[in-house]
Amino acid sequence: MFWGFMPIYLILVADVPAVEFVAWRTSFTLPICLFFVWYRGRGDHLRECLSDRRTMLTLLGSSAMIAINWLGYIWAIQNTHVYAASLGYYILPLNMMLLGVVFLGEKLSLRQWAAVALAALGVGALATGALTTLWLSLTLAMSFGIYGLLRKTAAAGPLVGLTLEAIILLPLVLGYLGYVQFFGGGTAFGRDTVETLAIMAGGLMTAIPLLLFASAARALPYTLIGFMQFIAPTLVFILGLTVFHEELQAAQLAAFLAIWGAVALFSWDIWAKSRAARAAAAVA
């Protein structure tokens, strides 16, 4: 839901260049994470991960993926490619579920495969109207799908992992911000009060949903997490209709109906399995 309502927040920073805003997001995310590392007494775990080569290499990869995802999404919104951005996050759940099957050995039931197929039809309906920007949609879907897979397999917990990702990216973002400030005409920070406060809020808007996602990714099947990702682009569609007053195209309506039919089918399968498990436990 955080990510679904993100376009409203991005209105406040529409005049901040995409790369610069990603840099500010990273800069303001790190102190928030460090505070919670101290508050929750996770300093020892942070030091353990810093000394673990495999963990740091995994987080290096996840850092690159989340930076690409942030940059692509913000650039898409600022350049009025909202359609391409929403399509990317409709493709994302399918990508995540397939990654879970291929790399984590997770299994899908027949009803779940049917739900995936139905959702794929909906995504296909959308893709036919966005061939020129499909590269952007695929970049968003693949970068975050791989990010989630790396975070699920990393030895670092959600909080420590996000903290280390911000630390890994910090030299790059500080170097970029320094260059813009002294050689590029100055940054957006400080030129307008509302805009500056919105930039600072980027830390919370980044940390909270990513911590929730990383916690869920470690606790739940990746295929299930993937299917839940349909919530965000659906909210974006609703915002497009009610807040941004965009015209609903026939392909969008077809995709919306197909994808939520898939969500209903997937949810029915989970409910049926849960009911069967409770019945079996009661008999035992």
Image: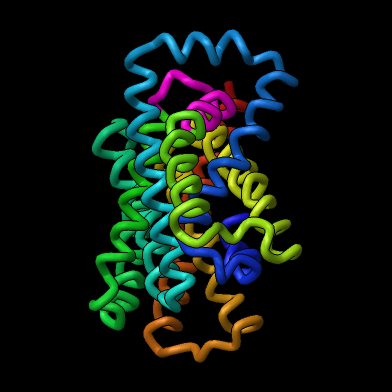
**Residue at 34 percent of width and 26 percent of height:** 58
Q: Is residue 268 visible?
A: no
State how many labels appear.
Answer: 0
**Residue at 67 percent of width and 34 percent of height:** 32
88 is within the stretch colored magenta: no
Please tell me in which quadrant of the rendered image residue 28 appears.
top right
Identify the colour scheme used: rainbow
Q: Is residue 46 visible?
A: yes
Q: Position of residue 186 (x, y in %)?
A: 54, 58
155 is within the stretch colored magenta: yes
Q: Is residue 196 left or right of residue 258?
A: right
Q: Is residue 98 left or right of residue 32?
A: left
Q: Is residue 21 left or right of residue 138?
A: right
Residue that sits furthest to the front in the current view: 182
> Which quarter of the rendered picture does the N terminus lie within?
bottom right
Q: Is residue 34 left or right of residue 90?
A: right
**Residue at 38 percent of width and 55 percent of height:** 92
Q: Position of residue 250 (x, y in %)?
A: 40, 89
Q: Which residues are magenta?
A: 153-165
Please tell me in which quadrant of the rendered image residue 216 appears.
top right
Vertical order, 182 against 163 (above or below): below
**Residue at 57 percent of width and 41 percent of height:** 27
Q: In front here: 12 or 106?
A: 12
Q: Position of residue 22 (x, y in %)?
A: 49, 52
Q: Main secondary structure of the magenta part?
A: helix
Vertical order, 188 against 237 (above or below): above
> Which quarter of the rendered picture does the C terminus lie within?
top right
Q: Position of residue 278 (x, y in %)?
A: 60, 33
